[in-house]
Image (spheres, rainbow, N blue to C red):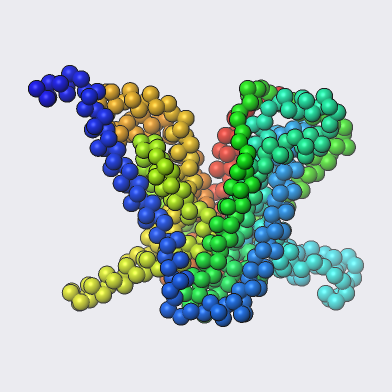
Amino acid sequence: MTEVVTSANPGLSQPLLAKRTSKRWMISALVTTAIVALPVLSVIILALFPEENIWPHLLETTLPRYLVTTIKLMIGVGVITLAIGLATAWAVTMCEFPGRKFFEWALMLPFAVPAYVIAYVYTSLLDYAGPVQIALRDWFGWQSAADYWFPEIRSLGGATIMIGLVLYPYVYLLGRAAFLEQSPSLFAVSRSLGHSALSTFFKVVLPIARPAIAVGLSLVLMETLNDFGTVDFFAVQTLTAGLFDTWMNLGNLGGAAQIATTMLMFVVLLVTLERYSRRRQQQFAARDNREPLHRFTMSFPRQMICVVVCAVPLVLGFVIPGATLGYYAWEYFDVSWNPDFLRNTMNSLFLSGSAALTTLVIGVTLAYSRRLHNTRGMQVLMRLSSLGYAMPGAVLAVGVIVPLAGFDNWLDSLMRDYLGVSTGLLLSGSAFALIFAYTVRFLAVSAGSVESALQKVTPSMDMASRSLGHSPGKTLVKVHLPMLRGTLITAALVVFVDCMKELPATLILRPFNYETLATYVYQFASDEQLYHSALPALIIVLAGIIPIILMNRSISNSRSMA
């Protein structure tokens, strides 16, 4: 009798079956989040209970210097990225001038250049033995550095400019998207009151776009905190450089974890300030936010100012580094194209591809679990799973190596006692550690993209699928994944490129005699051999252009333009 009722009216038993099946998704999300959050917990525990507590020594000697330098660097980079990002975003969105459509997408190109690469390029150009100072000495007859003054590129100021030139696209992207979403009626009212384009920007547009700008600035500051290649090359003593020195040179993992915890406090402070800055701001889409925007028409001199404002960061952040790398790669191609380069390229492709696939699978699992169980608990799990993106690479490396090395030691001891066989470093000494670190670091990119895309799919699609007898898993495979194909590809590409550029975590976690393109470039550049590192650096830059094109299309298609 039960079977007849069930088959005649499957709607009676379907919710029970769906509920039981969806619990598995919730359990999967819980287990995944616990694994992803493990590095953060490991860092905190190791910092609180180190084998050798050198925290008092750090407080008395190096830590204050690390803190002051880090704060100065973050403030400087924040000012540069805000100035460039907001000025260029406003110009290409609301002002009409020659080359505007070109600058819309070209201004994102510096995002493809890692900060450490641009630092290597400008050092080779502006150092005492570089072509710029050589030309100046030839022109003016100077014999040595004592005859003239030239700004020192290897300094805190130099590092600030280098990092700012490649990170301003964070503010530019989010600022431009916020400007595009604003109502044309606001600009019309401002014009009717006699305000100029500049006055409208400061009095109307900027206050409304502040939440998006705060998010972009917080991302810039977290990336600045994460940087190691630039500050190491310029001998700038930040917290990241101090972490490496404490761990690699002093051999004190506990002290490194304590510095890592200090960096985590910076991250928490940045996230808190970002949310506090927009705590009382609630925005709703205006009815006319899909109408074409009418840009400001300006005189020819002002148009040229817009061209200069957009051209300078593009030339300094992409054209000069790209042209320099291209020239060196061409001139030294026969030297650079060798078995080491090919092997390291394959290593980078394997690690980045594996991490992109892993983050995609986990991201889909978490986002779909959130769709099935839209509860406060699932919201907390989603936030916890995104912690890795806010963690600097060096901090993440500390958090990853501790549990993996602990597991390897436990397994090795067990196998020695019972089988007399040593298993060695199965996890911490292999590529698994790198893939795990990349997955934790960039999981927020894929999970966030999939979650936002799933929110646009009407719940009636799920109900229709379940009424046909499909389980939540089959609904995901047959209904949602085909609809999310574009989002999945974009998310995978972004993660892939981020992994290609990642340096701090890779330097710490890579196995012995195992190099990637990022570490390959770092080693040559550290030895003042930029010519040999130009080809692998150029490959990293070219790989980063692909997601930039996709992001530009997504933003440009968000609204029609007049």
Q: Quadrant of residue 180?
A: top right
Along the viewing direction, whichever of 182 and 486 lies nearer the viewer: 182
Image location (x, y in percent) of residue 139 = 88, 65
Does residue 360 lie above or below 499 as drawn? above
Please state, as top left, top right, bottom left or bottom right, where the N terminus lies in the image: top left
Q: Is residue 244 above or below residue 81?
A: below
Q: Is residue 260 visible?
A: yes
Determine whether, in the image, residue 57 is placed left or right of residue 52.
right
x, y percentage for residue 59? 59, 76
Q: Quadrant of the C terminus?
A: top right
Q: Nearer the viewer, residue 346 or 170?
A: 170
Q: How many marks?
A: 0
**Residue 93's quadrant in the figure?**
top right
Q: Is residue 418 above or below residue 218?
A: below
Image x and y of residue 90, in percent? 73, 38
Q: Nearer the viewer, residue 228 or 473?
A: 473
Res. 509 in view = no
Seen at 60% across and 30% down, the residue is 284
Query: Horizontal placement of 409 versus 247: left or right?
Result: left
Most distant residue in the top direction: 8
User: What's the residue at 36%, 66% (across, down)?
Assistant: 404
Q: Residue at x 73, y 28 (%)?
A: 186
